[in-house]
Image (tube, rainbow, N blue to C red):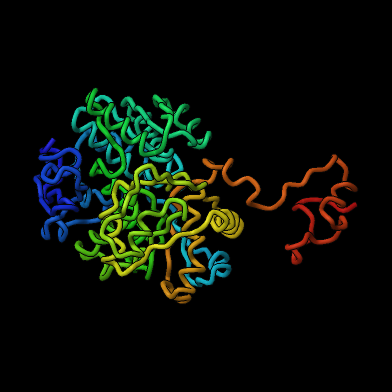
Amino acid sequence: MPDHLMPGFVWSCARCAATFPPGGVTYTCPRCGDGRLGMALSPASAASARVRTDVPTMWRYADLLPLADSPEVRRVATALPVGWTPLHAVPRLGAETGVADLWLKNDAANPTGALKDRASSLVVAAALVRGEQVVATASSGNAAASLAGVAAATGITCVTFVPTGTPPAKIAQLSVLGARVVVVSGSYEDAVALCWSACVEWGWYCRSTGVNPFTAEGKKTVALEICEQLGWSVPDAVVVPVGDGNIITGVHRGFADALAAGWISRLPRLIGVQAAGASVLAEAWRTGEDAPVVVPGRGAGTIADGIAVADPQDALRALAAVRTTGGTMTTVTEEEILVAVHRTSATTGVFPEPSSATAVAALPALLADGHLAAGERVVLINTGSGLKAVDRVAGAGTPVLRCAPSLRELSSVLGVGVRSPLPGNEQGSGLLPGSRTG
């Protein structure tokens, strides 16, 4: 595999700072045993990096990714195009939350509906380069679906491990994508442990978050896209949902690499948001610890299943990402999450899953506490689609009305006359486009 790795970088351990040549490691740090590895670019490689503007996917940043060009990389890049998702201003949501210059990076537009397609694309490319036959991952749903999707497009066998309580829509997605789906009777951490044991026992290639160093490297492309889509003008802050910590780690790596390449002049503040029922990283941040205190047997209870993590796999790098950018971490309640799902959907047209909605839910408190200013440019990252979690958000939106097929009864149910405007639509006619009045 060394011949297929991009020259000019080394793997660097977040725990002990040891460095290793590109082909010298597969998963975590061999020196300290459990340290997460990240790609450290040489100054020369960073300076020579160029954007491939003719490539409308995450692979336009191939010069900053750890895999050199090869038939395997091209196969993955073209089989399931990932990335270059929309970034757009959301003024109605901004007006409701008090952030005038608010933007949404909608990574639910990726093929399987989640940001994690970026990691899986790079991981499967690495697996094919290595000659692997089976890829596997433990996940609360999105990472597993993304791996299953890329595996389906490229023809490699995929085994996924999900915990009890994974939303049925996510399990259905795994199944129809052709993955071997294992529902583990236990927590997310139990699924992670079983997946790792299976990979060791049968020699499968493990994609699990934090363990595989390619995951954060793939996720960093979302930050590179934000920079480019804003005309290489850096936002003041980026708000990121946090579970394992691998996404915010990847976002930090992307901005840091863009800075090293000379594409941007500074880093934005990174703000991590956790659900109150799964908040060990936010607790570590509040107490000034470099690592969270994980209590054995303590679970993670939240409707935001994508970030329901009791033992974060990329804790050190996540906390460092927030600290080195001058950001902060905060938590939101279950009620605030549900309100944010509806508020985001009803003002932007984008339906976020509960995990993604945490970023919106945090905005009022971040403004009140001075971590954001009303005039700053703020980017929210929508990490996954709400269509995967419809069972979790039932009742969060407007009431569902029912009536017989009668205009008179419809008028009564809506509480308006046939020619009267609907409440909340006073400037409209109250009629459907193309309808007739008589």
Q: Residue at x 46, y 43 (%)?
A: 113
User: Is residue 279 rendered to the left or right of residue 34?
Assistant: right
Q: Nearer the viewer, residue 286 or 321?
A: 286
Query: Which corner quadrant holds the N terminus?
Result: top left
User: Is residue 58 rendered to the left or right of residue 200?
Assistant: right
Q: Is residue 109 visible?
A: no
Q: How many marks?
A: 0
In the rendered image, residue 307, in percent from the top left (x then y), is placed at 42, 48
Q: Residue at x 50, y 30 (%)?
A: 172
User: Is residue 222 rendered to the left or right of residue 24?
Assistant: right
Q: Is residue 398 visible?
A: yes
Q: Nearer the viewer, residue 174 or 41?
A: 174
In the rendered image, residue 154, in percent from the top left (x then y), is placed at 33, 29
199 is higher (above) or lower (below) than 86 = above
215 is higher (above) or lower (below) than 138 = below
Q: In the figure, residue 403 lies in which quadrant?
A: top right
In the rendered image, residue 2, in percent from the top left (x then y), is placed at 11, 38
Q: Nearer the viewer, residue 12 or 89?
A: 12
In the rendered image, residue 382, in percent from the top left (x then y), is placed at 45, 53
